[in-house]
Image (tube, grey):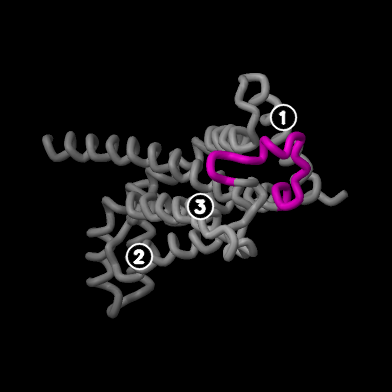
Amino acid sequence: MNIFQAIVDGMTWLLNRLYEFSVIIGLPNYGIAIILLTIIIKIALYPLSQKQMKSMMGMQQIQPKIKEIQDKWKNKDPKKMQQLIMELYQEHNVNPAMGCLPLLVQMPILIALYRSLFNFQYADPQSAKFLWIHNLSDRALPFPAFASDPAGFVLSYILPVLAGITTYMQSKMTATTNDPTTKMMTITMPIFITWISATIPAGLALYWVVYNVASIIQQYFVNKQAAAVRGEASGK
């Protein structure tokens, strides 16, 4: 057995254990198990994501200084411009690469969860239903029953749309610049996530939405703390 298959099997085992916990608390459902899994992963990645969010907030604060350096040195001495920007990063203890790190860490988890849900053997098929979702392994696309079940087709898109909306909200809260490229990414990334979420098992889209909501709440408090620090600094 290769390492990746071991990770997939471990994910399947963990989902079944969390499902058993949902049975114990009187809410037997694999959707509850996925939400619990998301919370566990979010807690495990909290220190990393907290550092990433603070770094991104720091990037926002020094953006005017970065632009000032770029305007002054971009055409005169690009090498010196890069050096001054790097010194500015070090001075304010920020790292642009931190923005991608939490997602990179999550990639093995997302892939393992995808493979696990793809052919998941549910202990109770009835527990694979969650709210309006007929089966957590189902995908919005393709939807062969569209002609006979248009209502089901519409309902299947609720999670992908929520995935896109929550991605957009988080992107707006963490955007470090207002340049055209950043604005374009803020719009195109949620659209891309919506489409991807429609082609993967609904359980994985549920994971993405719950994780995003938790990140939005965390980002709100990070932003609030940063605003308080800026207010104290300006008061001095």
The residue where tag 1 is placed is 17
Looking at the rendered structure, the kind of residue marked 2 is Thr
Residue 90: percent from left, percent from top: 38, 51
The residue where tag 3 is placed is 155
Examine the rendered structure and indicate whether residue 29 appears above or below residue 85: above
Which mark is first along the chain, 3 or 1?
1
Q: Residues within 10 Å of mark 2 (few under 14, many from 20)?
A: some
Examine the rendered structure and indicate whether residue 65 appears above or below residue 108: below
Residue 127: percent from left, percent from top: 67, 35
Q: Quadrant of the C terminus?
A: top left
128 falls in the magenta region = yes
Q: Residue furthest left?
A: 235
For the record, the magenta segment spans 115-133
The residue where tag 2 is placed is 182
Residue 63: percent from left, percent from top: 27, 58
Looking at the rendered structure, the kind of residue marked 3 is Leu
Q: Residue 1 vs residue 212: left or right?
A: right
SS assignment at label 1: helix
SS assignment at label 3: helix
Which mark is first along the chain, 1 or 2?
1
